[in-house]
Amino acid sequence: MPHSDDFLAVHDPAATRPAHAPDAGSGRWWGFAVVLTAGLLLLCGLTWLVSVQRGLASLQQSTATRADRYAATLESTLDRYEFLPALVSLHPFVRGLLESPNDPDRVAAANHYLAEVNRRAHASATYVIAANGIALAASNHGQPGSFVGTDYRFRPYFQIASGGTLGRFYAIGITSDEPGYYIAQPVESGGKVIGVTVVKLNLEWFQRAGNGAEPLMVSDDNGVIFLSSVSAWQYRTLRPLPPALQAELEKTRQYHDRAVTPLPLEPLTSPVTRWLADTTLDAGARLVRVRDDAPTTKTTFAPDGAERADRYLELGRTVGPAGWTMQVMAPLEPVLANARNATVAAALAYACICLLLVNWRQRRQRARDMLYSRRLLEAAYDELERRVEARTADLMAINEKLEEQVAERTRAESELRAAQDELVQASKLAALGQMAAGITHELNQPLAALRTFSDNTRVLLERGQLAAAEGNLTAIADLTERMGKITSQLKLFAGKARPVRRPVVVRASVDHVLALLAPRLAAVTISVTGLDDLPGLAVRADELKLEQVLLNLLGNALDAIATAAPQHGRIDLDVQADGHAITIVVRDNGTGIAPEALPRLFEPFFTTKETGQGLGLGLAISSSIVREFGGQLSVANVPGGGAQFTLVLARAPATDAADPARTVSAPQ
Ligand code: ADP
């Protein structure tokens, strides 16, 4: 027979498991994740590079425009003032002064003229130096820190101009301590330099030309930054100065007492920045870093101090006449920030796409799994149906078999019943035969005696022996009385009188039975308990029949004692009452009852007594009487020997209405 508990193990070849099922494909998922991560990194890197590249190109373009503008502004300023000293040198006041330097009128005229020119030209100072290097007149004459009388021999611009050419020089004023651009023009007379006219310009306004966030600086041919929008960078060098040059600077006091130290500016040299510079930047542009030891960097052009602009796109321009270089430093931070933002945005977009992809993959996977599960279920369902059909067929076969068995059993039962009926019939016949044998036996003896007595009596009468004949007749009467008793027993057993139930006082019945049996009871000890307290105790019964039952029980007890313990026989009769019932127990110390006899004790004609001693009807009749009263009669052996009969009857209301005149005939 097929078993249904393994149907889930069914495998339908059509429902093959998807190759990418999660348990089989976790490695594939890992691979997928690794590919996605690598893609993310690649995308981030590329985005960053492209963004930086574009940002740099754009920054370079805008910075270059601004740098050109700054350079043009500076150049035009310098050009504008280039001819001023030459003009001044041509003026008669100047020439007159140089020819007669000690003439106070000429000095005053020259001073006045220089002051006027200086005011109109918006220069810092305009002055005239004699060939010996001493300033003769100046626009700031008569003012504290006036140049008049100062010796300028050591100043390079004086030395150059003394040589007959235009001298240009940027330095810090030794008198005023203010930086400035000096243009010196030789004044010649008769092919000889008789003096020098100098115009000093203040170029510090140029430091503020930038847009604040974009440092600007101008360095001279030695690399010394003399103009810078970052004050901390001013008077620092772009490259270390050779000691000879350092000594020369000290000698010419070009930067007065300022310590000229190198600015920690270095090009960015990582492979990525080099690649970016090579692919994006024009000549003259480079990526640099200014180290942290320039502490005012951020306060100068990032007043809020929020950003640390230490990396720049440096764009150089050559300006001025003396090999000057202007550098515009555009911070890289905005470019890097933009690149960062673009990278983050690209990463987010990529993550979104990946999530969508994963989601799509999972949905597709789920759909496949569901399809697979459905196929599996369908296969299982088909198999289940097939098995249910098979099982149903099996069950139907079993059912048919069972029906056959039931029919067979019914047949067997009816046969058994017939056999039982036959048996009952046979046992009835057997009982009848037994009874017939008993009666025959009981009656044969007195009948034979009767015949003998009657024959003898006829002989005695023929002989005239009347007294003897009368004795025989008395014996004949006794015998007939005995036979009558036997037949009366049979009548009692057979008779089904209408049951009569009325209150019967137990005490009266017991006393009456004890009186009837008094001669036999004299040989044993009899004890009656339970009646003294309840003299009016009554049961629902017929008093004659109740006494017949008690007579039978006490008679049997006496018989058993006579067989087992004739010398010290004892009978206990105990009466107990409760709410609805009265129990009468008759206990003896006689033979007791053999175990095999116990179940048959109440059968009619069952007896263990000698033939002629008992018919085996006493207990059968007694139990039938008790049943008639709605009571029970039971038997048990007493431990230690003897038997105990228990009679239970329905209790009746207490009464004194006992009939003292009734008589009862003992059955035995
Ligand atoms: P009978 O007395 O004519 O044999 P009963 O029906 O009165 O018929 O008793 C049946 C049998 O029960 C008796 O033969 C006897 O073996 C047994 N029996 C009855 N009462 C007692 C008793 N008190 N002790 C032992 N055996 C008993």
Image (cartoon, rainbow, N blue to C red):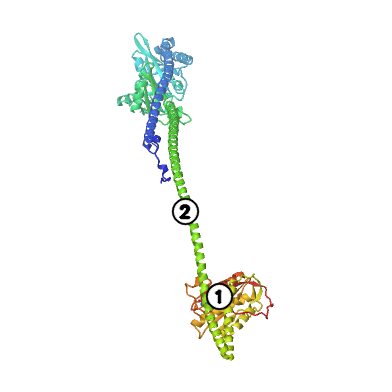
Structural distance between the alpha carbons of marks 2 and 1: 44 Å
Residue 497 pos. (x, y %): 63, 70
Amino acid at the residue labelled 2 = Glu
State the residue in front, 35 or 360.
Answer: 360
**Residue at horizontal 50 percent and vertical 62 percent from the top:** 420
From the image, tell me which residue sits under label 2.
408
Q: Secondary structure at mark 2?
A: helix
Q: Residue furthest front?
A: 462
Tell me where residue 558 sits by quadrant. bottom right
Q: Is mark 1 within 8 Å of ligand 1?
A: yes
Q: Quadrant of the C terminus?
A: bottom right
User: Is the C-beta separation of discs 2 and 1 under 8 Å?
Assistant: no
Q: Nearer the viewer, residue 534 or 433?
A: 433
Q: Earlier in the sequence, mark 2 or mark 1?
A: 2
Residue extending farthest top = 190
Q: Residues within 10 Å of mark 1 (few under 14, many from 20)?
A: many
- In this rendered view, identify the residue nearer to me: 544 or 66: 544
Disc 1 residue type (three-letter): Gly
- State the image coordinates of residue 358 (x, y, percent, origin top left): 43, 32
Checking the image for residue 618, the label placed there is 1
Q: Residues within 10 Å of mark 2 (few under 14, many from 20)?
A: few
Q: Look at the picture and state if 569 lies above or below 28.
A: below
Given residues 20 and 627, the one toward you in this image is 627
Q: Give residue 348's quadrant in the image.
A: top left
